[in-house]
Amino acid sequence: MSDATRSIASPPRRGRQGRPGRPGRPVGRDRLPALALVLAMIAVAFFALPLMGLLWKAPWSNAWSLLHKAGSLTALRLSIVCSLWATALSIMFGVPLAWLLARVEFRGRGIVRALCTLSMVLPPVVGGVALFFALGRRGFVGQYLDRWFDIRLPFTTAGVVVAQTFVAMPFLVLTVEAALRQFDRRFEDAARTLGASRWYVFRRVTLPAIRPALVAGAVLAWARALGEFGATITFAGNFPGTTQTMPLAVYLALESDPAQAIVLALVMIVMSFAVLIGLRDRWLGAVTTRSA
Amino acid sequence: MGKTHRVLVASLAVLGSVASSCGSDAKDTAATTAATSTPAATATAASNTASATTVPTMTGTITVFAASSLTEAFTEMGAAFEKANPGAKVIFSFGGSGDLVTQIGQGAPADVFASADDSNMTKLVEAGNASGTPTVVAKNSLEIITEAGNPKGIATLADLATPDLVVVLCATTAPCGKLAALVLKTAGVTVVPKSLEDKVKGVVTKVTMGEADAGIVFATDVQAAGSKATGVAIPAEQNAVTNYSLVVTKQATNTTTASAFIASVASPAGQAILAKYGFLAP
C-alpha cells in the first residue's frame, strides 16, 4: 500500500534492472563495517544453533504420535488460552498504568515504576512464592478471597493466568510508556481545543499513534506469558488440564520421555515463530515504513 | 558473495572458540585443582600397589547431585566430610532424581549421583553414565504430610479421597510420586490431586504454606519440616520403601574423593547422620 503511494509521489523510479525495492530500505547495506557484520553473524548463530540442536534431536519418524500422546494437546490448548487471557489483562490494566507513568507527575513515580516492573527481574519462582503470600489461601489478601468470595487461585487455571500476567505485564507497560513519552502531545492538545472529550482524544488520537508500540508490547507480553514456567509451577502447581501448560509439560516430559519433550518444544517454537513473523509484517513493518 | 562467505565462516569459527572456552567454567577450575593432586595420587597409588599403606589424599572439589529428599541429611554429611578431609570441598545440587539423571546425561558436572529410588539409578547406569556399581546407603518409607496439628483430622490413606480436601502428590517421574501411586493402589484408594509436583519438596512447600491440606511424601521430609507439618503414619502393610543409592558418575573428574564420599556415607558415622534424619538402615 505504501509502495503505491510512494511511487506516485516520486515519479523517477529505480533502475529497470533492479527489483522495485521497498521504500525506506537502506541503500548502503554492504557498507556495514566488517566487525559489526561478524558480530551480527555470531549473534544470529547464537540464536540459530540451539534451535538447530532441537531440530537435529527431534524424533521425526514418530513426531505425530508423540504429539497426540496423552496430555500434549491439552497442555497446548491450556497454554494458548492462558497466555491470551494474560495478554488481554495486561492490555486492560497495563495501558492505563503506562499512561499514568508517562503522563501524570506525582511524588514517588520512579518507585511506582520500579515496583510495577520488578517482576521482570525477579526470579519467577520468587514471584510465585510472593503470589502465595499475597493471594494464596493463607495469603493476606487471599484468605479474604477464600472466606468471603470462595475464590481460590492456587491450583486453578485462573491462578495460571494470574502468574502469567504478573510476569508478562511489565513488558507491555514499558513499551507503551516509552511510546507515550515520545508522542507529540500537541496533537492531543489540538484535538482538545477542537472540543473532543478526553476519552475521545485517547481513543482517536493517542491510541492510533501508539498502536505499533501497543502491538509490540502485547506480543512481548504474550511471548513471556506463553513461556512462563517458574511462577506457574510454584503458584498454580502442575496438573494436566487445569494448570499444566506447555512449558510445564515439556519440563516433566524431559524426565520421562525426552523425545516427547522435544516435539512439544518444537510446537511451541513454531507457534511463536509464526506469531512473531506474522505480526511483524502485518503491523509493525507497515507502520514503521510509513512513519519513516 | 565470496567475501560474505568468508566472513560467515570466520564468525562461526569465533563462535566455536567462544563456545569451547565457555564450556570450561567454574567446574573446570575445580577440575584443575583436582588435576594437580588426584592423577598424581592415583599414579603413586598405582605404582605402589604392593604397599597398601598408601592413603589417597582427599582433596579438591566434588559435586554431588542428590535427590531433594536428602537435602538436610546430606548438607550435614558434606560438612562432616569436609571436616574430616580438610583439603576437600563438597558442592551439592539437590533436585528431583529424574531431573538429575537427565542433567547428568546432558553432561552436567556431577561426580556423585544419589538417587531416591532404584529405577532412576538403573536409568543412569543403563545410559552408561555411572562408573562402578551403586551402593545402597539408606531406605525410606512414605508418610502422609498435613499442616501443623493436622487440622483436617486425616488418619488414613482413605481420608485423602475426601472430595473437598486439597491433596498434592509428586508426579510419577519423581520417586515419591511413583511410590505414592503404588501405595495408593495397594490401599485401593483413588485420590484426585490438585497438583503433581516435580519433586518431593514441592509437595512439602505447598502443605507447609497452607495451600494444600495433605500430601504423600517421604517420612524424612515430614521430619525435616519440623513444627511446620504433622505426619500421619501409613501402616506397614500398605506402605512401600525405596532404596537410596550412590554411584560415582562416568564423567567424574575427582574419582578418589568421590569414592571416599560414598564410603563416608556408608560408614557408621554417615549412617548415624542418616538415621538422625529419619532414614532407615539399608
Image: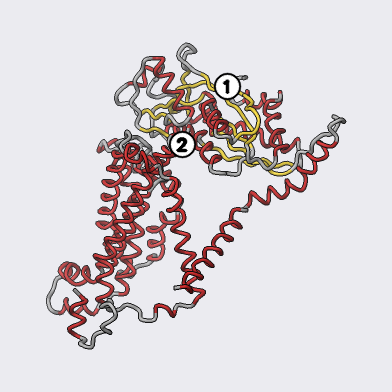
Q: Position of residue A110 (x, y in %)?
A: 40, 65
Label disc, if present, on residue B264 of the rendered structure: none
Q: Tell me where residue A159 sits by quadrant.
A: top left
Whether residue B7 is situated above or below residue B129 in the rendered picture:
below
Q: Position of residue A153 (x, y in %)?
A: 31, 40
What amino acid type should be assigned to the residue bearing mark 2?
Answer: Glu
Answer with left or right where residue B189 lies relative to residue B126: left
Whether residue B238 is situated above or below residue A130 in the rendered picture:
above
Q: Position of residue A56 (x, y in %)?
A: 44, 48
The subunit carrying tag 1 is: B
Residue tagged 1: B139
Q: Secondary structure at mark 1?
A: strand
Q: Position of residue B120 (x, y in %)?
A: 52, 30
Residue B20 versus residue B38: which sits nearer the camera?
B20
Q: Tell me where residue B14 sits by quadrant.
A: bottom right
Q: Secondary structure at mark 2?
A: helix
Q: Name the residue: 35% across, 47% down.
A: A163
Q: Name the residue: 39% across, 81% down.
A: A28
> How many angstroms separate mark 1 from mark 2 (CA)?
23 Å
Q: Residue furthest bottom?
A: A12
Residue tagged 2: A255
Query: How many numbered marks are there?
Result: 2
Residue B21 versus residue A149: which sits nearer the camera?
B21
Whether residue B195 is situated above or below residue A36 in the rendered picture:
above
